[in-house]
Amino acid sequence: MNYLKGFIGSLIFFIGSACLLAFLFISVDIDPSRGIIIFIIFFSIGMARLGYGIFTGKIKLPNLKGSSIKTNKLLLKRSKKIIRTDKDSVKFLRLILVVFLISTSGWALFIPDTRDSIFSRAISENVSNMIYTKSKVKKCEYKEWIVKNPFFDWTREEWEKGKNDPNPLVSDMYKKVKLFYPELKRLCYTINLKKFIIENNISNQQANSFIKNRTYLLPTLERSVSTKEIGNFWLEKRYYKNYNKSAKLIKIIHPIIFIISILVIWQFRHSMTNLILKIVHKIKSEI
C-alpha cells in the first residue's frame, strides 16, 4: 500500500511539473530544443522522487511553528539578552521594514516598466536575450550590379536619344556620360552550415576557422589573395535577438519574482527586525 501511494505521488508530481514547465516555455515562445526537453525530463524525474518521498512519509514537510518554537528555546538558552520582535514596541518598526522592502522590490521590478526597470537592465534583460539570441551563418560574395549614375536624372530613353542626336556637340556630350556602370556589391544569404560541410567535404574545425578568421575563399575553397572579386566568398556568423519574446518573458517572470520576494520578506521579517535592533543596541552601547 505504501508503494502504491508513492507511485501515485511520483506520477502526480511528474505530470504536474512537466505540464507546468511546458506551459511556461510555450507561453514565452521558447523553441522546444533538445536541451530544454532534457531539462524538463530530468526536472520532472526529480519532482517525482520528491512526490514519492512525501506520499510515503519518508520526506516530512517542515512544521514552521514547531521549528520556530524550538529555535526560540535554543536561542533563549544560548543568550539571555535576546531581543524579541513579538513585542508591541517593535511591531511598528517591523511593519515599516516590511512595507519598505516590498516597495523597494516592486520599484526595482516594475518602475518605470518591466523592460526599463533596474532589475531588468541588470539581470532580466541579459538573461532573456541569451535565451532568445540565435545565430545564423551567412555566405557572402560580391556580385556585379548595374547602377545608375546619381549625378544625372536622365532616363535610359533620354540618354539613348541624346547619343543619337543629329547635333554632334549634343551627341558627343551624351556619349561621354556613363549613365549606367557596373559596380561590385556584397550579397549575403543564409546557409545550412552542416549541409555546407557535407557538400564540400570539410571538417567542423575548418568551417569554424573560416568563420572566425573571415577567410576569403575561391569556389574551390582555397584561400583567395584578392577580396573584391566575382566568385570569391566568405562565411560570417550573425546574431539575431528576438526583443518581442524577450519582453514577453520579462513580463511573466517579474510578477513571479515579486511574489517570491514578498513571501521571503514576510518569512524573515522577525529575523531582519532582530538584526536591526541588535545593530542599534550595539551602537548605543558603544556611544
Image: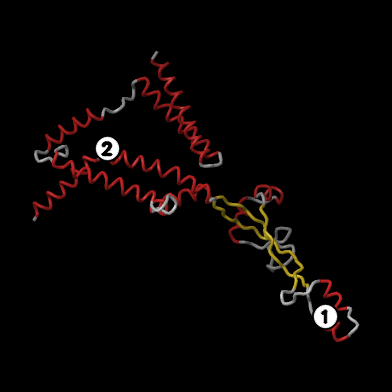
Helix, strand or loop at label 1? It is helix
58 or 176: which is nearer to us? Answer: 176
Name the spot of residue 281 as percent of width and height, x first: 12, 49
Judging by the rendered image, the residue that carries numbered circle 2 is 267
Crowding near the residue tagged with mark 2, few <14, some 14–19, many ≥20 C-alpha atoms within 10 Å: few
Amino acid on which disc 2 is placed: Gln
At a point 30% along the width and 45% down the height, the residue shown is 102
Q: CA distance from mark 2 to mark 1?
A: 87 Å
At a point 39% along the width and 49% down the height, the residue shown is 110
Using the image, tell me which numbered label, if any, was put on residue 189. Answer: none
Q: Residue furthest right?
A: 166
Helix, strand or loop at label 2? It is helix
Name the spot of residue 54 as percent of width and height, x first: 36, 24
User: Which of the 4 quarters of the picture holds residue 212?
Assistant: bottom right
Q: Is residue 266 left or right of residue 252?
A: left
**Which image quarter is the C terminus in?**
bottom left
User: Which of the 4 quarters of the picture holds residue 254?
Assistant: top left
Name the spot of residue 286 as percent of width and height, x first: 9, 54
Q: Is residue 94 left or right of residue 148?
A: left
Name the spot of residue 240 as percent of width and height, x first: 57, 53
Q: Residue furthest top?
A: 1
At a point 62% along the width and 53% down the height, the residue shown is 137
68 or 253: which is nearer to us? Answer: 253
Judging by the rendered image, the residue that carries numbered circle 1 is 174
Q: Is residue 182 above or below residue 46?
A: below
Q: Is residue 102 left or right of residue 193?
A: left
**Which image quarter is the N terminus in?**
top left
Amino acid on which disc 1 is placed: Tyr
